Image (tube, rainbow, N blue to C red):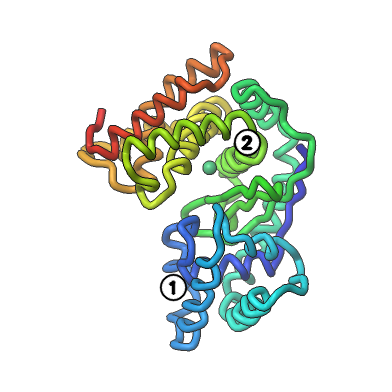
Amino acid sequence: MYLNFHVYHLTNLFFFVFHLSECHFSASQGLREEWLERTGPLSNEENILLEKFKEMVNKQTGDYPYFEERFFSSRLKAGDKTSQEIHRTLQAFSPRFKKIWLQDKPRLLYWQNKLLELTDSPKMKKSLGILARFFGTKPSQKAAKVFLLAGLSKHVGGFAVSKKQIIALECSSVPPHRADALLELLTHELAHLLFDKGKYKKMLNRKTAELKKNLDKEEVFSRPIEVCINEVVFTNLVNGYLGQKFFNRNLKSFAEKRLAGKKKITTYSDWLFYGCLHMLDKTRDYLESKEQINAKYLDNTCKLLEETTKGRLH
Ligand SMILES: [Zn+2]
């Protein structure tokens, strides 16, 4: 897959307002607080604008608000009334955002160059080969756009919008010596883009529908159940298995420390660590015996979530 890396002011400004408004579950935890610390408290007028912005986002459906996609661009295209209203809000927040942009843009430009070089590395190619075998599909040859975004000072984050072949990486704080961590994150998001579809997606939907029935709810840890299962699958594969093999990471020992002494799993991130702790060995067995993902693998993950939500920890 060919990757284009972009550093756009408009996209970054949109995500600045997106996070300040706390409008969506996909927002990165702590980013709002950190940005307010760097740019000062909000005025009454700004609070009103953010409240309106939040309402507009909440009217949209789907994994990501549809108009988010319009902002993956260097320039805003003419749009409907909602789009114009959002544009006005963005303009109002532009002076506040300037401070963040001046500091973070040079670091994003650094990674724009560096990532182009790194994505050509053998470990990236091998990683995608291993995943392609597991999902029983060939990686697409289409181009994908990778947008680099300002992020937290101590965290890297990202997401993928599969239908649009778009990836976003919050990476402005990543120091040059942590290139492996960023490459691991890019591999995770790329894996969503390439393999989170088709036969696998159908199987996931079937299995999570059963689980929703068993649990008699649609969401756990404030996320749709299919998101909770899907994310454990991709975290185990990429951050767990490939992380250890290629990216200098030991997620299992990190998860052990993070969950030490906990008697209950109450947050989404702890669920991901817990899912890794209990599914990583199984995932390794599948990958090393060259077995493809199947219903049994997903059954194990679903069962783990079912027991976890009922408070029965292993
Ligand atoms: Zn993911």
Quarter of the figure that contains the N terminus:
top right
**Picture coordinates of residue 172 (x, y %)?**
59, 57
Q: CA distance from mark 1 to mark 2?
A: 40 Å
Residue 218 can be seen in this image: yes
- Residue matched to label 1: 37
Of residue 248 and residue 256, the one placed in the foreground of this image is 256
Whether the residue under disc 1 has CB within 8 Å of ligand 1 = no
**Picture coordinates of residue 198 (x, y %)?**
64, 33
Residue 303 lies in quadrant: top left
Residue at point 25%, 37% (across, down): 260
Quarter of the figure that contains the C terminus:
top left
- Hey, what amino acid is under mark 2? Lys
Of residue 281 and residue 107, the one placed in the foreground of this image is 281
- Hey, what amino acid is under mark 1? Glu
Which dot, 1 or 2, sits closer to the camera?
A: 2
**Picture coordinates of residue 154 (x, y %)?**
47, 54
Of residue 250 and residue 47, the one placed in the foreground of this image is 47
**Picture coordinates of residue 232 (x, y %)?**
45, 36
- Residue matched to label 2: 197
Residue at point 46%, 79% (across, down): 40
Q: Earlier in the sequence, mark 1 or mark 2?
A: 1
